[in-house]
């Protein structure tokens, strides 16, 4: 297996994406956003394709989430339509009808059954979609479809809301002597901005999958990537990740065979997930929490997540402060059992706490290393078990508070 | 039952506390704090008294916590010694020996068994106590003991760390034709400050209790007060609340009889708990989350806690923003089942969301009300069940981030 990773730059410079065959993309401006930025994104599969989705666990979920759940997994999908600027959440039956209408417009435009269209929305909660603008955007997107990288990037731009940069990545990989491609786009980490909901993502590939294996694969990919990042821990009403494969497999491949695809898609999605965190509202510094020695992987995950979410840890990262007391005590209240006498912590590779006791270290020097690091590494060992996990997070800054305190209703 | 509540002012003006008979108090300066502020607090019971404690759930806990657990509940307690400025946490066996020594010094000073002394610490994690200064402080406190209000306040001052004001409250109440008193002091909400751990609290009364009923009562009091507030959700290594009664009961009273005491102590403790939140680092605005209609009280508690802890809700409160989407969606990801179609929210008594749908309201007017309110009220109904709970929290401000980002190691 071999990866050739490409990844978009924060400053959209030249990029080179590995795009799977069979898909066309477009971004368009319907006028939903007051800013006049692109707000309708369309991905069309030339032939019926396999589609799987993973959606928010929030009990308060948006209309498009319901439609994604109802219509996937399926092997006759033809398109994904997304609008940004309005989440179509908490909008009742009328909101559901609007989401249905979005799919119908796309279906009549490209000539397919409306059930074969998926829909996603992101933006303000609690307001009806301005359907005239949405429909105008769909029409314009239909006219702008194309399979070049430029079209792919236009679609990726049009799903963004308060994102400061576009988030795309891709790779190719070998399986059974053939080369396949996987490309992905996503937007906005969690509910990071005022009234803006949602992490949305689309992964496209030409690796052959059945709808069943697409669903299994996507679940594994999301668990190892998008579910391991957090900006503020606020699960949105709209979170959705879609996986599309233009190659409809007729029978399920073995897990071993699919592992090549899952690994490649995981690498690509992890790049996006890290971009989400790096683009977190007000975020300056990015950090990884690695946990080993837990009783099992689930325990390690809970501990890593708790450390990554602690406001005191996040502010310490912001200050470049090797404040081990905050990190170790966060592990202590996470829930899963830890062996305190076997607990150790290293920051940027330097042990500061070993076997339940603090070590002497040069705090000023370590602080300097943290401040220079693009991705501060925290490594916790919490016992002698085999459980291991990683989690990625961003620091908590005054800018986050300032931005989210603005009166926006 | 009748309450006469008194409560200390943020600016320590004249106060009038109902002090139970049988206790003497002192605050002293041993020199543990670089600031030169009082750092040793001593409470002595003239006769053997009943003592119960509730301590942190953090698996990483400080040496004094271990001693409180080992020595309570008991009916032969004679003193509680507390130092501030150093948490004696993550200090290993030596730290445990230091805590034992603190109790021994008090015991030899007042003439009792060392086992009859409880100990608490708060301050920096991971540093050995400066025992010469601690012992000097204990000696000075022993010389300063007295039973007046001035002595009570001196003891309350000496447990503070980064607290901006002293936290005390008291009440008297009638039971069986007699008047009893309950007074309490506490300090610092959660791990709100750099490396500073701990909420500490002491409740003293002359209401007769057995050690068993003291323990049961304290658990009920804490569950309804200190366990329902949060500044940043970071459970410290040192949290401890002690209940002392100078009247040792010979047999357990009925729950009904004790209810009078529990209610009075709960009122007093709730005042302190709210002061903790109001004094949260950087906090400007205080808010209450009331949840009704959950399946049971535990579910209501989880939902209230999740809403109160959401950084997006806390920043909305800071901005005076009636941002119902953040509040409703936080209830949706809290965990317990909610009935989305029966979910309603009012802010400051004004409904903004009813039966799963947003209502029209004057956002500017409601924002004005929120900004004027000393305690913003959020009231969520999440279904038709009988579960109810309340939680108190403070807003998240730029000052919190600024303070906690400072390089302090």
Image: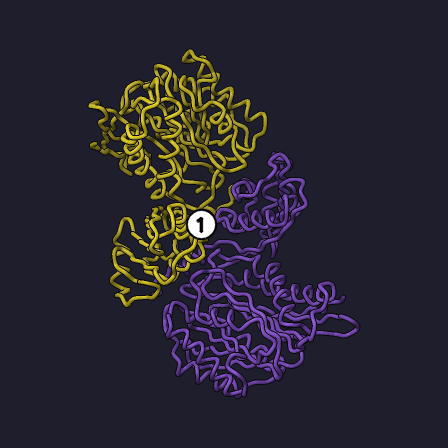
Chain colours: A purple, B yellow
- Relative to residue B171, is residue A21 depicted above or below? below
Name the quadrant of the C terminus of chain A.
bottom left
Q: Residues within 10 Å of mark 1 (few under 14, many from 20)?
A: some
Q: Quadrant of residue A365?
A: top right
Question: On the image, numbered disc 1 is attached to which residue?
Answer: B402
Residue occupying the far right of the picture: A177
**Residue reaching furthest to the top:** B111
Position above or below: A399 against A122: above
What's the residue at 62%, 39% (across, down)?
Answer: A343
Point out residue A48 in the picture as x, y percentages from the top left corner. 61, 81
Residue occupying the point 60% across, 36% down: A340
In the picture, measured across the screen, residue A391 lies left or right of residue B30, that is right
Residue in view at x 36 percent, y 43 percent: B277
The answer to whether any part of residue B90 appears in the image is: yes
Q: Position of residue A121 (x, y in %)?
A: 46, 72
Residue A303 place in picture, x, y as percent: 57, 47
Give the letter of the chain under mark 1: B
Q: Nearer the viewer, residue B236 or A94?
A: A94
- A374 vs A159, left or right, is right
Residue B352 or residue B163, whichever sits in front: B352
Left or right: B381 in relation to A147: left
The quadrant holding residue A398 is bottom left
Residue B312, placed above or below residue B253: below
Q: Image quadrant of residue A285?
A: bottom right
Name the residue: 67% across, 75% down: A18
Q: Secondary structure at mark 1?
A: helix
Q: Is residue A369 left or right of residue B276?
A: right
Seen from the viewer's position, the closer of residues B30 and B321 is B321
User: Residue B244 placed where, x, y %?
Assistant: 36, 24
The quadrant the N terminus of chain A occupies is: bottom right
């Amino acid at each position: 297996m071999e990866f050739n990773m490409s990844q978009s730059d924060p400053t959209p410079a030249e990029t080179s994406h590995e795009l799977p065959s069979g898909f066309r993309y477009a971004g368009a401006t319907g006028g939903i956003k007051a800013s006049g930025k692109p707000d309708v994104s369309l991905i069309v599969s030339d032939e019926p394709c396999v589609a799987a989705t993973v959606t928010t666990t929030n009990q308060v979920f948006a209309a498009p989430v319901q439609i994604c759940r109802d219509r996937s997994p399926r092997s006759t999908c033809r398109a994904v339509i997304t609008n940004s600027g309005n989440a179509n959440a908490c909008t009742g039956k009328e909101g559901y009808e609007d989401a249905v209408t979005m799919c119908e417009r796309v279906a009549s435009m490209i000539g397919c059954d409306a059930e074969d269209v998926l829909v996603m929305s992101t933006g303000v909660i609690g307001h009806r979609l301005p359907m005239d603008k949405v429909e105008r955007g769909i029409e314009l997107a239909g006219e702008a479809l194309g399979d070049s990288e430029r079209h792919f990037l236009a679609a990726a731009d049009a799903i963004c809301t308060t994102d400061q940069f576009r988030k795309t990545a891709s790779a190719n990989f070998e399986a059974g002597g053939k080369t396949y491609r996987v490309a992905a786009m996503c937007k906005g980490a969690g509910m990071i901005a005022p009234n803006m909901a949602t992490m949305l993502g689309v992964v496209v590939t030409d690796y052959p999958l059945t709808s069943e294996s697409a669903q299994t694969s996507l679940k594994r990919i999301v668990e190892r990537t998008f579910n391991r990042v957090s900006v503020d821990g606020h699960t949105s009403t709209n979170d959705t990740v879609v996986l599309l494969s233009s190659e409809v497999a007729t029978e399920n491949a073995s897990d071993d065979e699919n592992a090549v695809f899952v690994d490649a898609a995981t690498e690509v999605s992890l790049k996006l997930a890290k971009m989400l965190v790096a683009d977190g509202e007000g975020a300056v510094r990015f950090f990884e929490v690695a946990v080993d020695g837990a009783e099992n992987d689930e325990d390690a995950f809970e501990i890593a997540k708790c450390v990554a979410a602690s406001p005191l840890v996040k502010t310490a990262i912001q200050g470049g402060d090797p404040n081990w007391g905050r990190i170790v005590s966060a592990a202590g209240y996470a829930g899963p059992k830890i062996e305190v006498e076997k607990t150790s912590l290293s920051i940027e590779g330097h042990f500061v706490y070993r076997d339940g006791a603090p070590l002497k270290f040069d705090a000023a020097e370590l602080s300097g290393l943290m401040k220079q690091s693009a991705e501060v590494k925290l490594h916790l060992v919490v016992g002698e078990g085999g459980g291991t996990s990683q989690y990625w997070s961003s620091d908590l800054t005054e800018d986050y508070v300032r931005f989210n305190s603005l009166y926006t209703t």
